[in-house]
């Protein structure tokens, strides 16, 4: 007798489907299923429809590889944006994070991962060659790439990926930057880890 | 500009639908949506199908009000079960919890909530009248109800609901019990709250 044997098959199936999602254990999955049983029918249907549309309507932008419904994506097509400034991020979610800040007016390039030999991911599994090709292609246009911001995560793999891309770009004239590392705003110096604190010291800014 | 304005509409819609589920905030909702974008198509479809089937296939058992695909439900129809012993629980999830223990061989009655004036839930919003009617009806059968176990949660509202049902049953000859309250197995006396500890003392069991 397994955990869900006393449940109607349709409920058990939904619990199993929820439990396959990241961060949702069997208990949360049950709670979600029973919540939907009590909630109005429209809620389950709305979620079901959204799930069906998800893959049918989305694709990767052929320029920046962000997820989009139109190709090129809205950001790449936006004439007010600076096409000569490319922010390189790991995942589409990172694009949303930077867009939320509202202070970035360049465009993006989504790598779809980081170099991670542990997970069998090499440089060719990411959109790195596509970035190099994009820069080369744009070099002959009226708006050649001026700066690449390497905005991979400040993790070991993120740093390694940034370093790899930087080496790849060594021959080009494009300037390359990295997001500043330091104390998070609102954070407490006392609780900062040594590496963050050491980066905050190294990157200290002259006030006068 | 809202949080999801830089997202394709189909992704934003899925994030919104996920974020309406209990315990899933906007961040988790985004993570789930992007997980499904990367995952095989079958996973989203499986979840979508399960959601569509959920309400179409399930109903409440006309005897115990548990969620079921067949009426009466499998537990009520199981001839090996003791129909004279009814365990009264708040929610269908509680049935699963007790079934998992495997030591209960009676049947259930699901109240679908607790008496909660704060949430506008009175006795008539629950399946309490149905419980009284069920006991009355069964009294004339070959297997009249012998015992009612009030297994509502050990919360204020659960206790009040149990007390209410107990009063309702005062006139009948059915014996009424309540799940034991005490220290959770594997718990630490030092960290037990006063109420639990006081219940554990009151309910202490003679060893010899």
Image (tube, coloured by chain):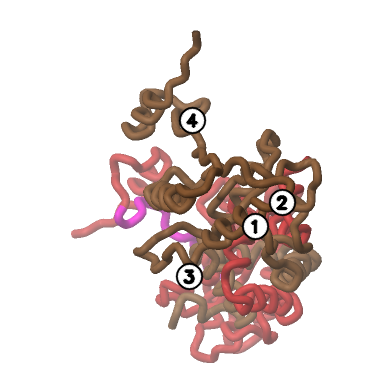
Chain colours: A red, B brown
Are discs 4 and 3 both within one chain? no
**Could you give the CA–CA distance between mark 3 and mark 2, rounded to whole angstroms?**
69 Å
Alpha carbon distance from label 4 to label 3: 47 Å
Residue contact between numbered discs 1 and 2, judged by CB atoms under 8 Å: yes
Marks 1 and 4, Cα distance to the nearest angstrom?
Answer: 37 Å
Q: Are marks 3 and 2 in contact (CB under 8 Å)?
A: no
Residue B141: percent from left, percent from top = 71, 51
Quadrant in which the N terminus of chain A appears: top right
Assess disc 2: are there few (<14), some (14-19) or many (≥20) residues with their C-alpha within 10 Å of its C-alpha.
few
Residue annotated with mark 1: B137
**Res. B141 mark:** 2
In percent of the image, x 61 and y 71: which residue is there? A109
- Residue at x 75%, y 60% (from the top left corner): B72
The answer as to whether the residues below labels 1 and 2 share one chain is yes
Q: Which residue is mark 3?
A: A98
Q: Quadrant of residue B17?
A: bottom right
Mark 2, chain letter?
A: B
Instruction: Give the alpha-carbon distance from disc 4 to disc 2, as whole Å.
Output: 39 Å
Judge depth for marks 3 and 1 and give the one in front: 1
The lab-note entry on whether marks 1 and 4 share a chain reads yes
Residue pointed to by mark 4 = B184
- Specify start and end residues of the magenta stretch as a single range: A173-186
């Amino acid at each position: 007798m397994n955990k869900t044997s006393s449940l109607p098959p349709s409920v058990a199936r939904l619990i199993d489907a929820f439990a396959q999602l990241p961060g949702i254990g069997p208990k949360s999955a049950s709670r979600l299923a029973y919540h939907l049983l009590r909630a109005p029918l429209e809620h389950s249907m709305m979620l079901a429809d959204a799930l069906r549309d998800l893959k049918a309507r989305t694709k990767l932008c052929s320029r920046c590889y962000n997820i989009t419904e139109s190709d090129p994506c809205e950001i790449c097509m936006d004439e007010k944006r600076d096409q000569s400034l490319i922010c390189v991020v790991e995942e589409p979610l990172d694009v949303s994070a930077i867009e939320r800040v509202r202070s970035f007016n360049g465009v993006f390039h989504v790598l779809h991962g980081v170099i991670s030999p542990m997970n069998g991911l090499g440089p060719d599994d990411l959109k790195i060659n596509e970035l190099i090709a994009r820069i080369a292609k744009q070099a002959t246009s009226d708006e050649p790439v001026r700066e690449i911001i390497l905005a991979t995560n400040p993790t070991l793999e993120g740093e390694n990926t940034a370093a790899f891309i930087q080496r790849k770009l060594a021959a080009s004239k494009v300037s390359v930057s990295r997001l500043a590392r330091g104390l998070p705003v609102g954070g407490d110096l006392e609780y900062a880890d040594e590496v963050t604190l050491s980066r905050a010291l190294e990157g200290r800014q002259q006030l006068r």
